[in-house]
Image (cartoon, rainbow, N blue to C red):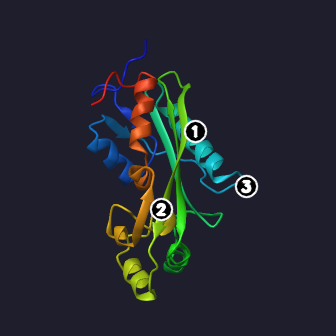
Amino acid sequence: MMIPIDETHPLVLASASPRRKRLLARMNIPHRVVVSHVNEERTDESPENFCRSLALLKAREVDIRENGSWILGADTLVVAGGRALGKPESHEAAREMISLLSGKNHQVITGFCVLNPHGMIAHSEVVTTEVRFKPLSEEEITGYIRTHEPFGKAGAYAIQGVGAFMVEAISGSYTNVVGLPMCAFIKALLKCGALKSFP
C-alpha cells in the first residue's frame, strides 16, 4: 500500500510555475517545489503529445532526485491557428503573440503526469480549453505589455490577472488556462490513491 499525500508526505511539484503552486495551495494539497531541469525546446510532435511528453520528462527528471514521493509534472502550451505559442522573450514577441490571439479563438493545452512513490506513471492526461479574445486595439496591446504580465506566460497572457480584460469567452477548465486543470487533476489523485478523499 502506497502512502497517500499528506503534510509529512507532500506532493512534489516538478515545476517553477508560481501559478501551479498557488493552485495547489488554494486546494490545500500539501506540496513542495523541486524545479526540473529539462530542455523545453519544441519538437515536431503535436502540441498534445509535446505537453504529455514534457510533463513526463519533468516528473522523471525530479524523480531521480526525489524518489519515494508522489510527483507532478506539467506543461502548458497555447495554440493559435495551428501555431504553438510558448513564453515571449521580448516585447516584440509578446506583441506578436497577443496580436495573433486578438479577436480569435485559441486552445490552451496542459499535459500533466503523476508518478507514484515507486517512480511508475500513475496517471497521464492532456486537457484542452478553448479561449476567445475580444478584438484588441494597438493601445490595449501596448498597455498590457507595459504591465509586464505577459512575460513568463505561455501565449503572453495571464487569465487570472490583468489579462482577464481580453478574454471574451472560455469553454472548458478555467484552471487549465492558469496552468493546471484542477478538476481532472484531483480526480486523478483520488483514482490512483494519492489522495484518500477530497476535500
Q: Residues within 10 Å of mark 3 (few under 14, many from 20)?
A: few
Taking the spot 46% from the left edge, 33% from the top edge, the residue there is 71
Q: Which residue is more in the foreground, 83 or 148?
A: 83
Marks counted in the figure total 3
State the CA–CA distance, disc 3 to disc 1.
17 Å
Taking the spot 35% from the left edge, 38% from the top edge, the residue there is 32
Provide residue 99's location: percent of width, then percent of height.
52, 78
What mark, if any, has residue 44 been given in the picture? 3
Of the 4 image quadrants, the one containing the N terminus is top left
Provide residue 49's location: percent of width, then percent of height.
65, 46
Q: Which residue is more in the foreground, 130 or 36?
A: 130
In the image, taking residue 187 as reference, residue 38 lies left or right, namely: right
Mark 2 vs mark 3: which is more N-terminal?
A: 3
Of the 4 image quadrants, the one containing the C terminus is top left
Helix, strand or loop at label 2? It is strand
Provide residue 124's location: percent of width, then percent of height.
55, 35
- In the picture of the structure, the residue carrying the numbered disc 2 is 131
Mark 3 vs mark 1: which is more N-terminal?
A: 3
Taking the spot 34% from the left edge, 30% from the top edge, the residue there is 10
Amino acid type at mark 3: Asp
Mark 1 vs mark 2: which is more N-terminal?
A: 1
Q: Is residue 150 above or below residue 118?
A: below
Tags 3 and 1 in contact by the CB under 8 Å rule? no
- In the picture of the structure, the residue carrying the numbered disc 1 is 56
